[in-house]
C-alpha cells in the first residue's frame, strides 16, 4: 500500500472509531468512512455492538416529531452547516464535530441519535444514502434562527420550531425541564480534527 493510501486508510479507521464512540451503527459507519463492513466488523464490532442496530426510520419525524426532537434536529443541522460554511469541513468531519458539540450541550443525553444526525446530513447534502438534497437551512423571519425545512418550503406563518418552543417554554413543564437540564452550549467552533473539549 502506498504511503498516501495508508494515510487515507488510517484516517478512515480513526473516523470509524469516532463515529462508533458516538453510537453509530455499522451501516452508518460504512457510508461515512467508505470502509467495507467486513473490515469494520473485524476491528470494531467483534462483540456485536451496533451491527444489528435499527436503521434510521423515515424522515417524517423531522416534520411531524415532537417539538423537542425537531428543535434539536435544527440545532444540530445549524452547527453542522456552520462548520461546513465557515471552516470548510468535509461532510464526515463536520458530522462528527457537530454531533459531539450537540451531545456535549445536552449533558451527554441527546435526543437525536448519531444515526439520525447522519440521516439529516444525507438529506441536507444529497450524499451517502441520498442522491439529492431534500432539506435546507432556512432563516426564520420572526426570530432569525436557522431551522431545517424542506427545500422550497415557504416560511411557516406561525414561526419556526424555535418560535414555537419559546412559546411553549413557560406553558409546558416537560419543555422547561428539558432545557433546565442542559449545559451551556459551547460558544466556540472547534477546529477540524481537533478535540473541542481541549479548545475551550
Ligand atoms: Zn423562529
Image (cartoon, grey):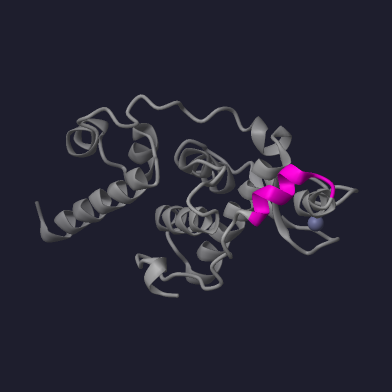
Quarter assignment of residue 91? bottom left
Residue 59 in view: yes
* Frontmost residue, 164 versus 59: 164
Q: Which residues, given as a range, are shown in magenta?
A: 171-180
Q: Residue at x 41, y 67 (%)?
A: 196
| Quadrant assignment, res 23 | top left
Describe residue 106's horizontal placement relative to residue 152 as left or right. Answer: left
Tell me which image quadrant ligand 1 sits in: bottom right
Residue 197 coordinates in the image, percent (x, y): 40, 67
Q: Position of residue 136 (x, y in %)?
A: 66, 50
Q: Position of residue 18 (x, y in %)?
A: 33, 51
The residue at 66%/56% (across/down) is: 180
Viewer-proximal residue among 88 and 177: 177
Does 189 sit above or below residue 101?
below
Coordinates of residue 97 in the picture (x, y in percent): 44, 59
Q: Is residue 122 above or below residue 37?
A: below
Amino acid at each position: 500500500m502506498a504511503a498516501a493510501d495508508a494515510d487515507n486508510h488510517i484516517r478512515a479507521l480513526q473516523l470509524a472509531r469516532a463515529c462508533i464512540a458516538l453510537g453509530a451503527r455499522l451501516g452508518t459507519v460504512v457510508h461515512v468512512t467508505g470502509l467495507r463492513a467486513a473490515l469494520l466488523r473485524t476491528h470494531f464490532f467483534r462483540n456485536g455492538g451496533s451491527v444489528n442496530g435499527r436503521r434510521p426510520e423515515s424522515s417524517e419525524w423531522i416534520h411531524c416529531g415532537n417539538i423537542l426532537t425537531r428543535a434539536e434536529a435544527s440545532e444540530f443541522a445549524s452547527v453542522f452547516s456552520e462548520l461546513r460554511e465557515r471552516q470548510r469541513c468535509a461532510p464526515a468531519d463536520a458530522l462528527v464535530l457537530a454531533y459531539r458539540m450537540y451531545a456535549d450541550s445536552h449533558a451527554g443525553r441527546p435526543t437525536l441519535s448519531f444515526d439520525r444526525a447522519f440521516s439529516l446530513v444525507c438529506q441536507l447534502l444529497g450524499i451517502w444514502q441520498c442522491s439529492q438534497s431534500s432539506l435546507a437551512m432556512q432563516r426564520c423571519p420572526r426570530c432569525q434562527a436557522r431551522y431545517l425545512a424542506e427545500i422550497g418550503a415557504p416560511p411557516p406563518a406561525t414561526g419556526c420550531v424555535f418560535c414555537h418552543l419559546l412559546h411553549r417554554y413557560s406553558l409546558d413543564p416537560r419543555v422547561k425541564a428539558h432545557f433546565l437540564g442542559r449545559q451551556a452550549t459551547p460558544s466556540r467552533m472547534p477546529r477540524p480534527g481537533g478535540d473541542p473539549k481541549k479548545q475551550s
